[in-house]
Amino acid sequence: MTLTIGQVATETGFTPSTVRYYEQIGLIPAPGRVSGRRAYPEDAIDRLRVIALARSLDFPLDEIRDLLDGFPAGTPASTRWRTANQQRIATLEAQAADIERMLGLLRHLAEDCDCPDLAQCASAWVTRTAAEAR
């Protein structure tokens, strides 16, 4: 059985234009055609659901492509996710550290700043950052 692009979109929650885009960039294989219309195999839904899961975890499209196609055939899902997650976790931990640093500075500026002008705040920040770097 084959599915129309509308059926695939409805089943996966993607818009038809997103399905076409993922097809265009090679995340999903180009489907066959029936009377000039796309005719997707049922397993396209499974692949799009994996893409949706990875996108919900903020994976970039190139990392999703690696997850789907960057392993030898038959590689278990657990191995694929473990490998992909190592990079993603490192990226998120770096982002979390940046967010904590920014939150600390914002809280300091909101609660402790008694500088008479903005230039003094900026100078104090540069001095503080240089001292922390040592």
Image (spheres, grey):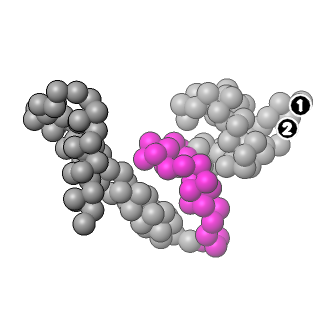
Q: Above or below — where is 107 with respect to 134?
A: above
Q: Are marks 1 and 2 in contact (CB under 8 Å)?
A: yes
Amino acid type at mark 1: Gly
According to the picture, the residue beneath numbered tag 1 turns out to be: 36
Q: Is residue 56 magenta?
A: yes
Q: Position of residue 129 (x, y in %)?
A: 26, 53
Residue 127 visible to an observer of this rendering: yes
**At 64% from the left edge and 73% from the top edge, which residue is drawn?**
72
Q: Position of residue 99 (x, y in %)?
A: 29, 45
Q: Which mark is residue 33?
A: 2
Residue occupying the far right of the picture: 35
Magenta residues, as a range? Answer: 49-74
Q: Position of residue 111 (x, y in %)?
A: 11, 32
- Dot 1: within a 10 Å radius of its alpha carbon, few (fewer than 14), some, or many (20 or more) residues? few
Q: What element does badge 1 sit on? A: loop
Q: Position of residue 94 (x, y in %)?
A: 35, 57
